[in-house]
Amino acid sequence: MERLDVVIPEMAIAPLTYESPVSIPEGVRVIVEVGKTLHVGFVLGRSVREVPAGVKLKPIAGVIDGACVIGDDVFDLAKWAARVCMCGVGAVLKNFLPRDIYIGEKSDPPPKIEHGEFHERTFFSPFDSERGDFYLSEITREKRTLILFPTQEAAKKFSDLILKKLHIRPLLWSSREGKPFHFTWEFAKFEDLRVIVGSQGAVFAPFSPEKIIIDDEQNPAYILKKSPKISARSLAGHRAQYLGAELITAGRMPSLKTYLRTHPDELITPERKNIILVDIYRSHKEQAPGIEGHIPLTFSLIKHTYRELSQKHNVMWILNRSGESSEVFCEKCGQVVKCEKCGGVMQSTGGGNVLRCRVCGHLKELPPKCESCGCDFFMGRRPGLEALGRIAEKYYHDVHVEDGRKGLILTTQKGLSLLGRVKPGLVAWLDLDAELWRPEHTTRYNAFSMLYESYWRGRTRDSQRKLLIQSRSSGMRLARFMLSGWSKFLDDELRERREFMLPPYGYIVEVEDRKPEVLKVFEEAGVFVMDPGDDEQPLYIYTQSLDTIDKILAANFKKYPKITIRSE
């Protein structure tokens, strides 16, 4: 009798061990009994776990398939993701397979494709159109190609472009629940299919690609929302290595991990005349009634905005604070109003009479009195876009808050998605330093990449755009790297991270729930845990070895807490 470990996606529990009179390949679906109920599981492999004396293993009740219906490479990808992200293989399969597959509905295995030897190339250009032309040139009828984009909207746009320019009908990957997802999954197995285009979830397509292209590979949108919480780019890289496929990483600028590994050349840098750095210290400090704090408006910002608007160019101001104010507090006792659903901080909106939770989005009216002291007067703190809108209307006409109409557009970083449509002549960051106050190790990199995107996104080689950055001395050092381009910045960022052994030279484990329990366990194990003391922030564990963290978790938790692994 052979002992086999089996994972059951529908239950998303740890592997269970069963006996079988015959050998069953990894990834094959089988029927097993849990309690007195039959379930569908996937064979994980031969079991090496000790069976306690006197425990009789149940036999595998039946074998559904003769081979792995999701593909050997997809099953390997699920196992690898579960291992590096400290979550169950069953949980990974449940999150990225159609339900019909993991409950045992009929399905055929994908075709076997001969592959070559893994190798990696890069293509970095700030111009979206040039990258699009490059991807089109890489799509051939001879090679099966998987192309990943950070958003489904971008994937659909490029899928339509392939059909229009090359007259090749690609499969646009759908991760919607139910029948559309199952149909997409089964269609991906067609042997004559040559191109799949999709966002993060497409990395699990049962397609066996010979070439994988990842656009905008540094984009944080590639981090999967479900377990495993890892970048789809990392998954694509592992899958390409397993298959012996070609991997092409591309975008406006590289991620730190890609830059460290491949050192791609920077083909073009911003024109120095179009980068305007303004010391925020001498700004006019505009205030809004009932809100503590101010919005800095420098003379240079006012002047350049007038100039661009007078030439009928659109202008975009970016302030990463939506609503009327970032938070609301009692003027008497200082108690911050928090969400009764999740405990998150409430921000004001709608003229200050409505509160919105910054974490879960829950809406409620401004309470009549403070729950702590009974005072009936509240103040806002840190004015947001709505307050900025009223201030800007004193200077300009056609002011639009979080809107893509022509004129002066006030927005958060989400408005960067509008750049290709509104094509502003000037993009201004009103307070870069606010982006650098965040506690994450990626703060500097994320801030610089947003500045870089502000300058280049939606542009062609013959177009012009100015980037104005208001900052204090702390942010000015970062802003100056825009004058020399991303290569100088990435060299500097890697030097700092190497000094403190931060990713990509180490790992950061973010723990999102059961924080008091986790904090106690790791402190007893002698492992330092950084606790920001904010309910909205996770715990941070800095480590050189994920094995150490895994052993501590395995010894103290039957079910792991929600974990995100940061490796760059």
Image: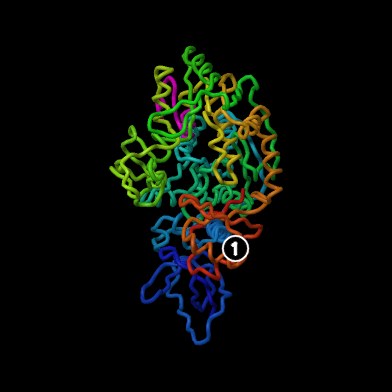
Quadrant assignment, res 2: bottom right
> Looking at the image, which residue is at 62% across and 63% down?
547
Q: Name the colouring of the figure.
A: rainbow
> Looking at the image, which residue is at 41% across and 19% down?
394
Decide: is 28 above or below 494.
below
Closest to the observer, 379 or 199: 379
The boundaries of the magenta stretch are 400-419
Closest to the observer, 371 or 496: 371
Decide: is 458 above or below 171.
above
Count the numbered circles shown.
1
Disc 1 designates what residue?
549
Closest to the observer, 273 or 25: 273
State the image coordinates of residue 178 (x, y, percent, origin top left): 36, 52
> Looking at the image, which residue is at 62% across and 65% down?
526
| Residue 247 is one of the magenta-drawn residues | no
Residue farthest to the top? Answer: 310
Could you say whether the residue bearing mark 1 is in a helix, strand or loop?
helix
Residue type at mark 1: give it. Answer: Ile
Residue farthest to the bottom? Answer: 54
Q: Visible in this render: residue 182?
A: yes
State the image coordinates of residue 326 (x, y, percent, origin top left): 43, 38
State the image coordinates of residue 115 (x, y, percent, origin top left): 62, 51
State the image coordinates of residue 34 (x, y, percent, origin top left): 40, 74
Side (left or right) of 356 relative to 249: left
Q: Visible in this render: residue 467?
A: no
Side (left or right) of 464 relative to 314: right
Pointer 1 local density, CA inside 10 Å: few below 14, some 14–19, many at least 20: some
